[in-house]
Image (cartoon, rainbow, N blue to C red):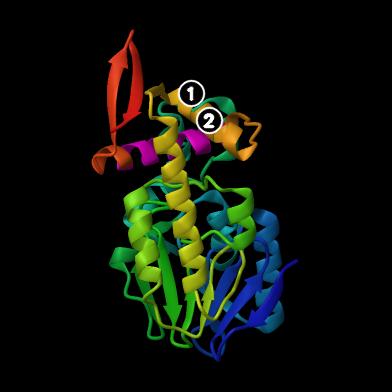
């Protein structure tokens, strides 16, 4: 399903499990906000553009996870247009195996190289060097990625990337992927202060008020933190803590899930150590984490 929905005078979104934004720069030119997950999404987007008589001038990627830039290569080649993301996120976009290596903690195994392979240097430019046209503004929303942004249009519509999980995802993915827990908590604080007419997370729950969803995500983080502190009361190794996460949420992991959850768990442990709530030590040559 790729349905074009008007959200304001100049603002549209393409309804899909991976929501994409469209902003009309003038009568015929538009920019895209994210491009979905692969060439099929790009072809569907292109069909919408052609039907509307629009020309694609540039792409804004809220962040460079593969389900948000999967259509970039196709659309950039078709329209001869650039794509912009923050310099932090462009590092992952421009080096095809960097994200997989980050999650894995070394050169990634074959399964991760396949799933998380990025497009490489196909023309991504740093948003910091680009002056957004009148009618568009950006803010930093770190946590789910290092350099994620939100985009606001002059219709009061916010495109928020993966700064919040929707309600269904909160029930299903209670240990959602993060790279920076403290940054994410700060992002949730910021979201509650935003003013606008419509808030569009990338994976659903379009809403006139983002605060309830931001609060739900914060409660989920707090629940995860409390559970980890309980698990570490007597001191546990990383693998034992990760097994507890899987057991708690009924997850039967595979290689990809293990990389996502393991990387996220390390971020929680680092955050709790920085907060003075955990300490690490070695016992019989095994690194362990213990609640203070």
Measured from the top left, where is residue 132 in percent x and y?
Answer: 36, 76
Q: Residue at x 57, y 26 (%)?
A: 110
Task: Pick the quarter of the image with the C terminus.
Answer: top left
Measured from the top left, where is residue 130 in percent x and y?
Answer: 32, 70
Q: Is disc 2 in contact with disc 1, using a CB cutoff of under 8 Å?
A: yes
Q: Quadrant of residue 113?
A: top right
Secondary structure found at label 2: helix
Other residues around mark 2 within 10 Å, as few (<14) / some (14–19) / many (≥20) = some
Secondary structure found at label 1: helix
Would residue 173 be counted in the magenta stretch?
no
- Vertical side of 257 occupied by 88: above or below: below
- Foreground of the two, 149 or 66: 149
The secondary structure that most of the magenta stretch takes on is helix
Q: Residue at x 46, y 65 (%)?
A: 215
The answer to whether residue 47 is left or right of residue 170 is: right
Other residues around mark 1 within 10 Å, as few (<14) / some (14–19) / many (≥20) = some
Measured from the top left, where is residue 107 in percent x and y?
Answer: 44, 26
- Foreground of the two, 147 or 271: 271
Would residue 260 be counted in the magenta stretch?
yes
Task: State the CA–CA distance, disc 2 to disc 1.
Answer: 6 Å
Query: Residue 160: in sight, yes or no?
Result: yes
Q: Residue at x 29, y 26 (%)?
A: 280
- Foreground of the two, 117 or 19: 19
Label ID, residue 244: 2
User: Residue pushed farthest right?
Assistant: 1
Q: Residue at x 66, y 83 (%)?
A: 53
- Foreground of the two, 237 or 28: 237
Magenta region: 257-271
Tell me the residue that label 1 is attached to.
240
């Amino acid at each position: 399903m790729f349905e074009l929905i008007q959200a304001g005078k100049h603002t549209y979104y393409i309804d899909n499990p991976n929501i994409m934004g469209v902003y009309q720069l003038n009568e015929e030119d538009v920019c895209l906000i994210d491009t979905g997950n692969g060439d099929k999404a790009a072809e569907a987007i292109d069909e919408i553009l052609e039907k509307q008589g629009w020309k694609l001038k540039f792409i804004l990627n809220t962040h460079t996870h593969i389900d948000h830039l999967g259509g970039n290569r196709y659309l950039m080649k078709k329209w001869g247009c650039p794509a912009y993301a923050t310099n932090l996120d462009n590092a992952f976009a421009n080096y095809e195996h960097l994200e997989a290596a980050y999650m894995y903690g070394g050169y990634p195994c074959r399964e991760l190289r396949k799933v998380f392979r990025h497009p490489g240097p196909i023309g991504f430019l740093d948003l910091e060097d680009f002056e957004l046209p009148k009618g568009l503004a950006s803010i930093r929303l770190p946590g789910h990625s290092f350099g994620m942004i939100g985009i606001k249009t002059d219709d009061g519509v916010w495109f928020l990337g993966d700064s919040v999980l929707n309600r269904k995802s909160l029930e299903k993915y209670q240990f959602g992927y993060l790279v920076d827990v403290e940054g994410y908590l700060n992002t949730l604080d910021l979201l509650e202060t935003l003013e606008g007419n419509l808030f569009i997370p990338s994976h659903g729950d379009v809403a006139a008020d983002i605060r309830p969803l931001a609060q739900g995500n914060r409660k989920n983080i707090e629940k995860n933190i409390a559970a980890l502190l309980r698990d570490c009361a007597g001191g546990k190794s990383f693998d034992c803590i990760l097994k507890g996460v899987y057991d708690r949420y009924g997850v039967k992991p595979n290689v990809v899930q293990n990389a996502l959850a393991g990387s996220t768990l390390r971020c929680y442990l680092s955050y709790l150590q920085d907060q003075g709530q955990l300490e690490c030590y070695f016992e019989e040559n095994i690194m362990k984490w213990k609640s203070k």
